C-alpha cells in the first residue's frame, strides 16, 4: 500500500544540460530508492509560465512527489532549466536552499547530439541540415530545437544561477568524465547530496547507466506529427515516440560545421573556469 503525503520542498534539481547525460544520472540516483525519490517525468515547470503561473502552480507541481517516503531526498530532472532566463529566480523564490546539479558536455558535441535527437522525435524536419540549424540560431533564439547553439553558452546560464544561489549549492559534472571515470564523478554527486556513499558503493550501484542513446525514427513523418500535436501531453508524446525508434548510426560532424562551432565556443571553457574554478577540456 502506498501512502501519500504533502511535499512542501525539494532537495535537489538536475537542471541540464540537454543531451549531456541527465537521464543517465537520474537512472543512477533512482537505483538507490532507499535514499532518493525522483519524479519519473521531466516537468519543465520552472521555465514554463503556463505551468508556473506566477507561482500559483507550485502545489500541483509538488503533487508529483507525493509518493516519496520519509527520509528520502526528493528531486527532479528537467534539462531545460539550465538555459532558462526565468528559472533561477523562480526556483530561488520558492526553494532558496535547493541543491542544483548540471552536467556540462563539449558544447559542439552537445549541439550535434541535440540536432539528431530533434530529428529522432520529429522536432526537426529531415530537410533541415545541421548546418542550417546552427547558422540560423540567432533568428531562432530561444526556440526549442530551433536554436541549438545558445544552450551551449554555459557561462551565461551558470552566471544567471550564481546571481541567486551560492557557488556551493551548484555541482557541475563533466560529461566526458562520467563516461570515462564514472566512479569519480558519481562520487561527487553522492557527496554533494549527502548520501551514504558506503551503502551505495557496497550495493554495486556506482555505475553510470546508459540512457537515451542515439537512435532514429522508423516513421519520421508520423513522429513529426506527434511532436507537433497539442492533443497529447509531453509524457504521452515521449512514450509513443519511443516505440518508433530503432538503432541508427549518426554520421560524423562535417569539418565546416565543427569549425563554425569552434569559433562560437572558443572562449567558453575559460569563461566557465573563471566562474566556477573548474577546467573543462573541450576540443573542437
Image: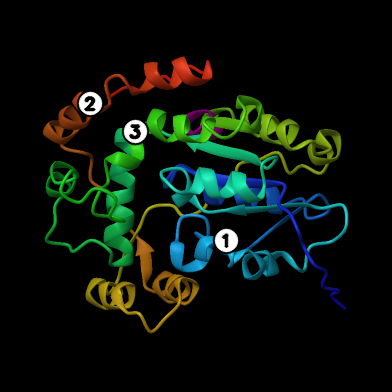
Q: Are marks 2 and 1 in contact (CB under 8 Å)?
A: no
Mark-to-mark CA distance, 3 and 1: 28 Å
Residue 61, x across and y down, in percent: 62, 66
Q: Residue at x 68, y 42 (%)?
A: 98
Query: Would residue 66 appear left or right of 196 to someone viewing this image?
Result: left
Q: Helix, strand or loop at disc 3? A: loop
| Residue annotated with mark 2 | 262
Query: Would residue 61 appear left or right of 157 to someone viewing this image?
Result: right
Q: Earlier in the sequence, mark 3 or mark 1?
A: 1
Q: Residue at x 55, y 33 (%)?
A: 178
- The residue carrying pointer 2 sits among few (fewer than 14), some (14 to 19) or many (20 or more) residues within 10 Å by Cα, namely some
Q: Residue at x 67, y 47 (%)?
A: 95
Q: Are marks 3 and 2 in contact (CB under 8 Å)?
A: no
Q: Helix, strand or loop at disc 2? A: helix
Residue 168, x across and y down, in percent: 65, 26
What segment is highlighted magenta in the picture? Answer: 174-178
Mark-to-mark CA distance, 3 and 2: 12 Å
* Discs 3/2, front: 3
Q: Helix, strand or loop at disc 1? A: helix
Residue 26 shows in this picture? yes
- The residue carrying pointer 3 sits among few (fewer than 14), some (14 to 19) or many (20 or more) residues within 10 Å by Cα, namely some
Magenta: predominant secondary structure element?
helix
Q: Residue at x 62, y 54 (%)?
A: 76
Q: Earlier in the sequence, mark 3 or mark 2?
A: 3
Q: Quadrant of the N terminus?
A: bottom right
Asked where in the image residue 50 lies, by quadrant, the reply is bottom left
* Discs 3/1, front: 1
* Discs 2/1, front: 1
Q: Which numbered tag is attached to residue 153?
A: 3
Q: Which numbered tag is attached to residue 55?
A: 1
Mark-to-mark CA distance, 2 and 1: 39 Å
Amino acid at each position: 500500500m502506498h501512502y501519500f503525503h504533502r511535499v512542501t520542498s525539494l532537495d535537489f534539481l538536475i537542471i541540464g544540460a540537454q543531451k549531456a547525460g541527465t537521464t543517465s544520472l537520474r537512472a543512477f540516483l533512482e537505483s538507490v530508492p532507499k535514499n532518493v525519490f525522483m519524479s519519473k517525468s521531466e516537468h519543465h515547470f520552472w521555465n514554463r509560465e503556463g505551468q508556473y503561473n506566477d507561482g500559483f502552480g507550485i502545489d500541483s507541481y509538488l503533487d508529483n512527489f507525493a509518493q516519496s517516503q520519509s527520509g528520502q531526498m526528493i528531486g527532479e530532472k528537467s534539462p531545460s532549466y539550465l538555459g532558462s532566463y526565468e528559472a533561477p529566480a523562480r526556483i530561488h523564490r520558492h526553494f532558496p536552499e535547493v541543491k542544483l546539479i548540471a552536467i556540462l558536455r563539449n558544447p559542439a558535441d552537445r549541439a550535434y547530439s541535440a540536432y539528431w535527437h530533434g530529428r529522432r522525435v520529429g522536432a526537426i524536419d529531415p530537410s533541415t541540415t545541421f548546418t542550417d540549424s546552427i547558422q540560423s540560431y540567432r533568428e531562432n533564439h530561444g526556440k526549442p530545437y530551433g536554436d541549438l547553439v545558445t544552450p551551449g553558452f554555459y557561462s551565461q546560464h551558470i552566471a544567471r544561477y550564481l546571481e541567486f544561489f551560492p557557488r556551493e549549492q551548484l555541482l557541475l559534472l563533466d560529461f566526458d568524465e562520467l563516461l570515462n571515470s564514472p566512479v569519480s564523478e558519481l562520487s561527487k554527486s553522492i557527496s554533494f547530496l549527502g548520501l551514504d556513499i558506503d551503502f551505495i558503493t557496497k550495493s554495486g550501484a556506482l555505475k553510470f547507466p546508459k540512457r537515451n542513446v542515439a537512435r532514429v525514427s522508423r516513421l519520421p513523418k508520423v513522429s513529426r506529427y506527434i511532436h507537433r500535436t497539442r492533443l497529447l501531453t509531453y509524457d504521452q508524446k515521449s512514450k509513443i515516440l519511443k516505440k518508433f525508434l530503432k538503432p541508427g548510426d549518426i554520421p560524423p560532424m562535417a569539418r565546416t560545421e565543427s569549425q563554425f562551432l569552434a569559433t562560437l565556443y572558443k572562449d567558453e571553457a575559460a569563461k566557465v573556469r573563471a566562474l566556477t574554478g573548474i577546467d573543462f577540456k573541450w576540443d573542437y
